[in-house]
């Protein structure tokens, strides 16, 4: 009977030990996992804050760059057209009917050009066009205007199955193209630009190629002036990163420039 | 006099084991019911109803033999344990394989699977018969499944902690597997060196561990029926 009691004590001890060790194990795992979850959530919040900060910086950069463009456009085109119109009108001599008519017609042309330029600036600034009509339509409108101005000829192609990306993404992609074309017109003396949008199902491959003078990419990206002032190329890279994309710039002197931007939008991106 | 002593010993043994056996049977029966009812919600656990049923059948054969009823030969008990251990290993490896922890782990599981069954068939056909006690096979099973369940916990802490662990059935089942084999492995390692008088104590601890293991699986069945990875 004594042996039986000892065995019962032994089994009860084993049972207690097993249950306590199991509980200890479960509580330890849950505690450690919860601690990891808290650290993970903190990291996520930090990344989110950093992302929002970058987004704000880029939006400010875009705004600043846009204001500079408006200033330049107003000064170079609209201002000049209106000055010419004013000059014409100021120099009218009413007695000289023939000359007056020519000057009035010329002034009308200058004012019409100023109106077209203003309309063009307004359209390219209005992000509602992108949000309402999508990236492709906004680009078509922009290219139509640029082709009309005639400084450069742009060939625009879309392939794959186009979809509407997130509004923020469409806007940033549009600004990337604007920046790239602006660079072509301002710096490369290009006559022809090829713009391709390829929707691959999980990513958008955006390519802007020109036949301009080209440049040394490393030199351009690493120059102190660019770093300080924020060159267009750096802006393109930063904007691509902002929408979790990547960019690639290929150029060499005399052989034009190709800018490729990959913007993810597939299922994997959504999970990310 | 000797017969009387033997009867007393059997009665004493039965009394000590009685509650543990009852708890084990209860958890196994609840396991059968819940695993059958929730089989569609947990496709990853599709073999668990068979596993619970087989555990009930095997335990019943052992108990009937211990009570001396139906005239079972001990070989039948050993054969039933052999079949049960083999199926148990299949169910556990299948569970970890379906968790898709990583491609490397899946490949390792396939290798462990082949090694285990080659060893088992080898041991049945050469040294030890299918009708002998399968403790070597059990030891190999434990040696393979303990690292597998530890791997689960390694990935649990390696991957981003997006799971709600208390409501994750994989956590409870993996904990059960780790718990059961860690507790019982030492006893089976010293199986051949122990006195016959304490065999029933090992059975009791084994049943008790099974009862806790089954309870953890049942807890798993009460969790959310999706895999978070």
Image (tube, coloured by chain):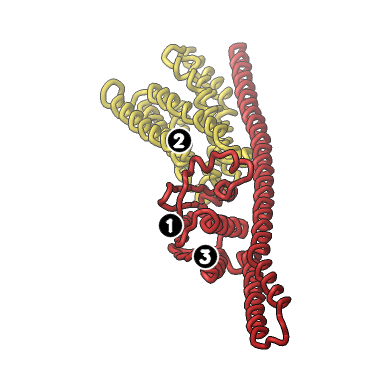
Determine which residue is flagged by label 2: B92
The answer to the question of whether label 2 and label 1 lie on touching residues, with beta carbons closer than 8 A, is no
| Apparent side of residue B184 relative to residue B124 in the rendered image (left or right) | right
Q: Earlier in the sequence, mark 3 or mark 1?
A: 3
Classify mark 3: residues with Cα within 10 Å, few (<14), some (14-19) or many (20+).
some
For mark 2, give the secondary structure.
Answer: helix
Q: Which chain is red?
A: A
Residue that extends furthest to the left in the rendered view of this protein: B126
Q: Nearer the viewer, residue B107 or A17?
A: B107
Q: Nearer the viewer, residue A266 or A262?
A: A262
Q: Nearer the viewer, residue A150 or A200?
A: A150
Q: Position of residue B119 (x, y in %)?
A: 32, 26
Distance, label 2 to label 1, CA atoms, is: 64 Å
| Chain of the residue on which disc 3 is drawn | A
Q: Position of residue A171 (x, y in %)?
A: 60, 59
| Chain of the residue on which disc 2 is drawn | B
Classify mark 1: residues with Cα within 10 Å, few (<14), some (14-19) or many (20+).
some
Q: Position of residue B83 (x, y in %)?
A: 38, 33
Disc sitting over residue A151 in the figure = 3
For mark 1, give the secondary structure.
Answer: loop
The answer to the question of whether label 3 and label 2 lie on touching residues, with beta carbons closer than 8 A, is no
Relative to A159, does residue A85 appear above or below in the rendering? below
Whether labels 2 and 1 belong to a single chain: the reply is no
Determine the image quadrant of residue B136: top left
| Chain of the residue on which disc 1 is drawn | A
Distance, label 3 to label 1, CA atoms, is: 13 Å
Classify mark 2: residues with Cα within 10 Å, few (<14), some (14-19) or many (20+).
many
At a point 59% along the width and 38% down the height, the residue shown is: A224
Whether labels 3 and 1 belong to a single chain: the reply is yes
Determine which residue is flagged by label 1: A211
């Amino acid at each position: 009977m004594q042996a039986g009691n000892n065995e019962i004590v032994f089994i009860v001890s084993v049972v207690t030990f097993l249950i306590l060790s199991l509980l200890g194990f479960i509580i330890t795992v849950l505690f450690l996992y919860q601690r990891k979850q808290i650290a993970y959530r903190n990291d996520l919040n930090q990344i989110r804050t950093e992302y929002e900060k970058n987004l704000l910086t880029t939006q400010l950069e875009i705004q600043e760059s846009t204001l500079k463009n408006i200033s330049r456009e107003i000064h170079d085109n609209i201002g000049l057209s209106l000055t010419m119109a004013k000059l014409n009108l100021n120099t009218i001599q009413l007695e000289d009917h023939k000359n007056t008519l020519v000057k009035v017609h010329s002034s009308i042309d200058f004012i019409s050009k100023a109106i077209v330029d203003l309309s063009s600036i307004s359209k390219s600034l209005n992000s509602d066009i992108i949000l309402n009509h999508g990236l492709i339509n906004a680009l078509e409108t922009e290219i139509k205007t640029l082709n009309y101005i005639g400084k450069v000829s742009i060939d625009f192609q879309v392939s794959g199955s186009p979809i509407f990306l997130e509004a923020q993404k469409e806007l940033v992609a549009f600004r990337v193209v604007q920046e790239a074309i602006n660079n072509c017109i301002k710096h490369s003396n290009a006559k022809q630009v090829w713009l391709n949008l390829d929707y691959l199902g999980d990513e958008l491959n955006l390519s802007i190629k020109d036949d301009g003078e080209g440049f040394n990419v490393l030199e351009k990206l690493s120059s102190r002036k660019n770093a300080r002032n924020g060159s267009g190329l750096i802006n393109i890279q930063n904007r691509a990163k902002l929408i979790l994309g990547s960019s690639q710039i290929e150029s060499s002197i005399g052989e034009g420039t190709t800018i490729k931007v990959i913007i993810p939008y597939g299922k994997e991106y959504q999970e990310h | 006099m000797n017969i009387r002593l033997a009867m007393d010993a059997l009665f004493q043994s039965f009394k000590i084991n009685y509650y543990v056996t009852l708890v084990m049977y209860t958890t196994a029966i609840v396991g059968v019911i819940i695993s059958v009812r929730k089989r569609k919600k947990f496709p990853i656990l599709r073999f668990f109803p068979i596993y619970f049923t087989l555990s009930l059948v095997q335990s019943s054969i052992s108990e009937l033999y211990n009570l001396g009823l139906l005239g079972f030969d001990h070989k039948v008990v050993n054969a039933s344990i052999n079949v049960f251990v083999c199926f148990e290993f299949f169910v556990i490896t299948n569970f970890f394989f379906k968790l898709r922890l990583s491609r490397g782990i899946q490949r390792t599981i396939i290798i462990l699977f082949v090694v285990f069954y080659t060893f088992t068939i080898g041991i049945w056909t050469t040294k030890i018969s299918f009708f002998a006690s399968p403790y070597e096979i059990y030891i190999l099973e434990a040696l393979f499944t303990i690292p597998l369940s530890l791997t689960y916990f390694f990935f649990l802490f390696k991957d981003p902690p997006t799971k709600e662990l208390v409501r994750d059935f994989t956590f409870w089942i993996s904990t059960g597997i780790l718990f059961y084999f860690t507790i019982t492995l030492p006893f089976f390692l010293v199986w051949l060196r122990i006195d016959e008088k304490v065999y029933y104590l090992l059975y009791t601890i084994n049943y008790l561990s099974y009862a806790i293991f089954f309870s953890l699986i049942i807890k798993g069945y009460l969790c959310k029926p999706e895999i978070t990875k």
